[in-house]
Amino acid sequence: MSHSGDTSTGTITTKVPARLDRLPWSRWHWMIVIGLGTVWILDGLEVTVVGNIASRLSEDGSGLPISDAQVTGMAAALYVAGACSGALFFGWLTDRYGRKKLFLITLAVYLAATAATALSFSVWWFFLFRFLTGFGIGGEYAAINSAIDELIPSKYRGRVDLIINGSYWLGAVGGALLSVLALNTDIFPKDLGWRLTFALGVVLGLVILLVRRHVPESPRWMFIHGRSEGADELVSQVEREIEAETGSRLPEPKSALTIEQRRSIGFVEIARTLFHDYPKRAVLGLSLFVGQAFLYNAITFGFGSILVKFFDISSGSTGYFFAAIAFGNFLGPLLLGRFFDTVGRKPMIAGTYIVSGLLLFLTAWFFNNGWLNATTMTVCWGVVLFFASAGASSAYLTVSEIFPMETRAMAIAFFYAIGTAAGGISGPLLFAGLTESGVVGDAVIAFCVGASLMVLAGLVAVFFAVAAEGKSLEDIAEPLSARRAADGDKPSTRAV
């Protein structure tokens, strides 16, 4: 085994995962949640604001020569394309160079691109920086989800992951209400209000960056990539802080893990691991992401059109209705999250998917029979999305914990890209005509497609979901390096 400062590689035995998993909840964990989780609020703010200010951007005097179709069509598609490509690109870098470097870099990309969007003077400039904003946000998903799951104790991992992913909808509420304020020409001129909404995203991002600087690298990533001493030192420091905070000694960690340290992993090995070693889990991940993507698109793509066309709601007031269902989306993971750790992953994942799909079928039936008004329709959507949001958030939790450590960020990136592409590319192609036609039956078809895929994904979860609650990540999916260490030679072993 070679030694090179804190970057030596070889075969080591470590208790770092067990030491992290037996920690009680502490101020240190809150710092991680705040530092890493707040990016979803930014994403929700971004997507919602752009959708709601589309009409203002296309008006004469906005300072940008762009049409409404270009904002909701090309700009939205470029944002999605950026998110998909950013997830894959930064996901690979995250597994190779570490969680901390990448969650700082991806936030910096987001900040720079959003600031440039606020300064848009032409259509091509706006398009370019919508793509780059998505590129940064997509990278965030892989870096953040992998870091969260590797730093949060196994007892709390499910609820924390769900609530953090569900916080997207707090941003959506803020974006919907912010757009109402920004579009008020009694307060801001036409060519200024929409720019200020993007500028606010920059301000929030800078605050997050200040907090995030204090979030450490994942010790799990460190000990696999030849930085075992640094991992041990970091966990020891956290243990001392928590013992000082609680005034009691921590129990001894139970299990040790022997792994062969490695610098990187290639795409071929990642693909083989996901689809050859864990085919049922790969099918589960794809099903969950595609199901939630189509359900959300079935509702959200026609949301404004249905309220305006069928219930005579003015286009300027739809933001209030959207804020209401967005809040319901946040409540789902917030109130149901703990049951994913107590009742269990399989019944909760399958249950939230199937229940939300069946409720959307019921909503479609009510709507088809003319039994709903704008308020009751919004209530129905809110109830559907209460369950669907918990299910959708659990999709991110699932793919981040059921594959080996070395492939985690890339697995998140891959399934996120597939789901986002399905929602942002296939969804609009399928649903745009159906929900905007003004024909009740067409909108009902859109609802039924989304509901069917959600129920099917729930049935896949019944058979393929993994009972990961309360388990160490290394017990759910053994690290590739542990398998290699067990099968291969062990030139030397150090205890960490």
Image (cartoon, rainbow, N blue to C red):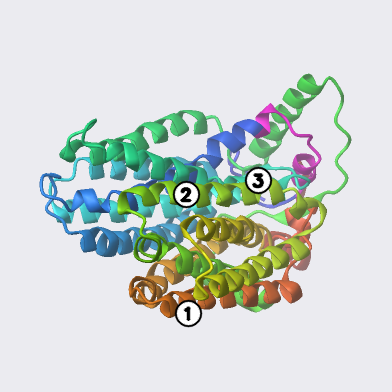
Q: Can I make out residue 132 in this image?
A: no
Query: CA gap, disc 3 to disc 1?
Result: 31 Å
Q: Which residue is mark 2?
A: 140
Indicate which disc residue 114 carries. Answer: none
Q: Which residue is mark 1?
A: 445
User: Going from the N terminus, do you reach mark 3 or mark 2 first?
Assistant: 2
Number of residues whose C-alpha sits closer than 10 Å to that of mark 1, classed few (under 14), some (14–19) or many (20 or more): some
Q: Can I make out residue 196 in this image?
A: yes
Q: Which residue is mark 3?
A: 334
Foreground residue among 30 and 334: 334
Number of residues whose C-alpha sits closer than 10 Å to that of mark 2, classed few (under 14), some (14–19) or many (20 or more): many
Task: Give the amino acid type for the residue marked by disc 3 in the picture.
Answer: Leu
Q: Is residue 225 above or below residue 360?
A: above
- Report the magenta residues as a range: 13-29
Residue 26 shown in magenta: yes
Give the SS element for disc 1: helix
Give the SS element for disc 3: helix
Task: Give the amino acid type for the residue marked by disc 1 in the picture.
Answer: Ile
Are the residues tagged 3 and 1 within 8 Å (C-beta)?
no
Q: Position of residue 310 (x, y in %)?
A: 39, 66
Task: Give the amino acid type for the residue marked by disc 2 in the picture.
Answer: Glu
User: Going from the N terminus, do you reach mark 2 or mark 1 first?
Assistant: 2
Residue 28 falls in which quadrant of the image? top right
The C terminus - image quarter: top right
The residue lying at 46 percent from left, 47 percent from top is: 323
Are the residues tagged 2 and 1 within 8 Å (C-beta)?
no
Give the SS element for disc 2: helix
